[in-house]
Image (tube, rainbow, N blue to C red):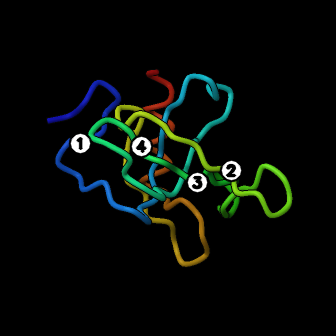
Amino acid sequence: PESPTGFHDNLPIRRGNIVACYVSEYKDEEPQLATITNVTDADKVEVHWMRGSYADTWHLCNIKKGTPWIEEIPKSSILYQVELSRSQRIPEPMKKKLKYSYSRL
C-alpha cells in the first residue's frame, strides 16, 4: 500500500539508501534528496541531505565545511527510493515521477 505521500510502505528503509522526501520546512527546495544514515525508530530516520537539481549531479551536503547536514525526519516524509545514475544524476523516469509528485503536494 502507498502512504499519503506516495511512498510504498513495503520498500525497505535501509542505511545507505537514497530517498526523495518532502519536508514542509523545505517546501521551496525541489527535489529533496537524502541518504539514510540511521533508522532511529519505527517512525523516524536520520538522513544526510544531498545537494543537486533535476538537471545537475547530486552529492552529500554540509552545513559548513566538514560538518555534514544530518537531520532526523519522519519516515512518512519519504516519497520514493532513488537510484542515481553512474554520473550521480536522477534518471529521466524518476525525474518525471518526482515532478508529478511534488506538483501534487
Give the CA separation, mark 2 to mark 1: 26 Å
Tag 3 near tag 2, CB within 8 Å: yes
Tag 2 near tag 1, CB within 8 Å: no
Disc on the earlier residue, 4 or 1: 1
The residue carrying mark 3 is 48
Give the CA separation, mark 4 to mark 1: 14 Å
- Which is more foreground, mark 4 or mark 3? 3
Secondary structure of the residue carrying numbered label 4: helix
Residue 103 position within the rendered picture, expressed as x and y whole percent measured from the top left: 50, 25
- Disc number at residue 8? 1
Give the CA separation, mark 3 to mark 2: 6 Å
- Disc number at residue 97? 4
Q: Neighbour class for label 1 at 10 Å: few (<14), some, many (≥20)?
A: some
Residue at image coords 37%, 51%: 39
**28 lies left or right of 45:** right
Secondary structure of the residue carrying numbered label 2: loop
Residue at image coords 48%, 59%: 37
Depth check: 80 or 74 in front?
Answer: 74
